[in-house]
Amino acid sequence: MNFKSRYENIKNLAKYELSIIEKKMIERINTREPLNTLLKGFLTSPSKRIRSVLAILYSKALEEDLSDEQLEFLSVVELVHNASLIHDDIIDESKLRRGHKTISAEFDNKLAVISGDYILAISMEKLALLGNTQLLENFSKTIKQMCLGEINQNFDRFKIGTIEDYIEKTKNKTAYLFETALTGCIMLSKTYHNIEVISQLATNIGVAFQIRDDISNMTSSDNSKPIKNDIKEGIYNAPVILGDKSDNYHSGIEKTKTLLNNYVQSAKEQIQQLPDNKFKTALYEFLELLKDV
């Protein structure tokens, strides 16, 4: 089976919770047509929902059912992620997202920017209504780091940095939202858990996920980004950094796969303490899936 079909099997274990999250994602969307329908369709279109899936699987691996508050929080995570995608499509001048025209292609960049900001505003409103100041503070820091990651990447275009620079950028752009999803969900649990361990696990998964994506960009097209699109845009990720800065990136890709495997292995070690059940097994299977690139 390919990545998509194998991941769908894992995702199905969170199917019930995801259906509630998707309803919560669009319940406050209320703007003028045709934008209103387009935004709701975009937010509920088929998507991996990886951050929510991992948070759900981890909670259920702890033998805990998710509360309405936790599902509301995960709807905020999904809204923030989708707002960032709208903004990414503007930056990348993308015409398609999930098989449909992007907001910027359907209307224009100005309305797309405002639409992304509108979704962010709704997510902050929903988060504030949860009444947990620590969650609000953590999420605000995460959004700030996501923005800094994009800003720094823009200034560093066509520059080959260090692998440490790359990991820092990867944490900012991707991993911290994974961390926020898992730690925030667990913080709303009625039971005490070691947040620091969960934070490290989520960060490792987030970094691994982005490394896999960067390898894929060098080796295959996902129908939304042309192969080696990052290099053409002057974004030099791990395969270039580890490839001795040459035009032959084969050695860099192999070294990047080793880096990916290191993060996956660390994450595996961090879920060993979970009770043995199908949700823990699904987390292991997801980590194995990340190595399939």
Image (cartoon, grey):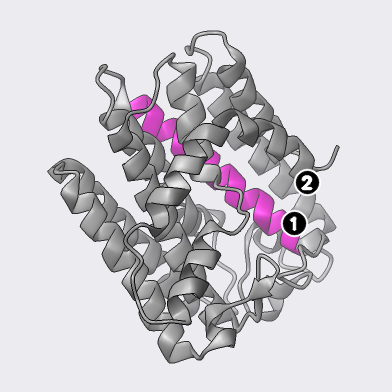
Query: Label 2 amino acid?
Result: Val
Q: At 44% from the left edge and 13% from the top edge, which residue is drawn? A: 63
Whether residue 16 sits left or right of residue 261 in the image: it is left
Q: Are marks 2 and 1 in contact (CB under 8 Å)?
A: yes
Q: Which mark is residue 293?
A: 2
Label tally = 2
Whether residue 206 appears in magenta in the rendering, the answer is yes
Q: At 51% from the left edge and 20% from the top edge, which residue is drawn? A: 271
Compared with 247, 19 (above or below) is above
Q: Position of residue 104 (x, y in %)?
A: 53, 84
Whether residue 43 is visible here, answered yes or no, is yes
- Quadrant location of the N terminus? top right
Rendered image quadrant of residue 31: bottom left
Whether residue 235 appears in magenta in the rendering, the answer is no
- Foreground of the two, 254 or 129: 129
Q: Which mark is residue 216?
A: 1
First to last magenta residue range: 196-217
Rendered image quadrant of residue 277: top right
Q: Position of residue 176 (x, y in %)?
A: 40, 49
- Foreground of the two, 20 or 209: 20
SS class of the residue under badge 1? Answer: helix
Query: How far apart in space, not on screen, are marks 2 and 1 (Cα)?
Result: 7 Å
Whether residue 255 sits left or right of residue 22 in the image: it is right
Q: Position of residue 87 (x, y in %)?
A: 47, 75
SS class of the residue under badge 2? Answer: loop
Compared with 261, 213 (above or below) is below
